[in-house]
Amino acid sequence: MQTRRSAILAWLTGRTNPRRAPAAAPARGLDPAVQARATETVLNDIWRERQAQLDKWGVQHRLPGTGAHNARHDANVMRLRCQAAENTGGATWRDVLLEEVYETLAEIHPASLRKELVQVAAVCAAWIEDIDSDAPHPSSAEEATAQ
């Protein structure tokens, strides 16, 4: 199982995917090796949590519960709110995540829903990486007064 997990992590971090597109430009000034280690750490944490979920509840199958009649409108509202926040000083991780979640909730087609869920997971991973980074973060009090 450890070998399979390592292979999945290597593929997810782009280290062994032979079909991978040409390498993208490195993220704004971040060493690609440092970024890869940060992402791998987060994916390991997610993998451990997923294993704990499987141990506790087993494999689950549920209805998606997406595509409610106002869901597309709600997704558009959240997109506009996130854009407005970005234009007036910067969107928070909360803004970005909620935009992605609402877009996900608006989807009804399995392929589109899956794509949106991957985007939600990627935003969550990026947020965790930011928490784990050495970059300075404003305190909650500073964030509250900025809103």
Image (spheres, rainbow, N blue to C red):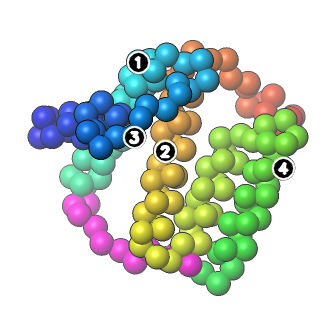
Which residue in the protein does label 3 denote?
21
Task: Using the numbered discs, state the Cα–Cα distance from disc 4 to disc 1 in whole angstroms.
Answer: 33 Å
Q: Nearer the viewer, residue 138 or 14?
A: 14
Task: Using the numbered discs, state the Cα–Cα distance from disc 2 to disc 1 in whole angstroms.
Answer: 18 Å
Identify which residue is drawn at 88% across, 40% down. Answer: 88
Residue 44 in sight from this viewpoint:
no
Say which mark, if any, is on residue 14: none
Identify which residue is drawn at 73% across, 60% down. Answer: 78
Relative to 70, residue 141 above or below: above
Give the residues drawn in magenta, as a range: 57-67
Q: Indicate the position of residue 3 as horizontal and vertical percent values.
A: 13, 35
Of callouts 2 and 3, the N-terminal one: 3
Of callouts 2 and 1, the N-terminal one: 1
Residue 123 in sight from this viewpoint:
yes
Q: Indicate the position of residue 145 as horizontal and vertical percent values.
A: 87, 34
Q: Quadrant of residue 77?
A: bottom right
Q: Residues within 10 Å of mark 2 (few under 14, many from 20)?
A: some
Say which mark, if any, is on residue 122: 2
Q: Residues within 10 Å of mark 4 (few under 14, many from 20)?
A: few
Image check: 134 left or right of 72? Answer: left
Label 2 element class: helix
Say which mark, if any, is on residue 33: 1
Say which mark, if any, is on residue 84: 4
Relative to 142, residue 64 above or below: below
* Residue 92 sits inside the magenta stretch: no
* Residue 62 sits inside the magenta stretch: yes
Callout 2 amino acid: Ala
Q: Indicate the position of residue 82 as horizontal and vertical percent values.
A: 75, 51
Q: Nearer the viewer, mark 2 or mark 1?
A: 1
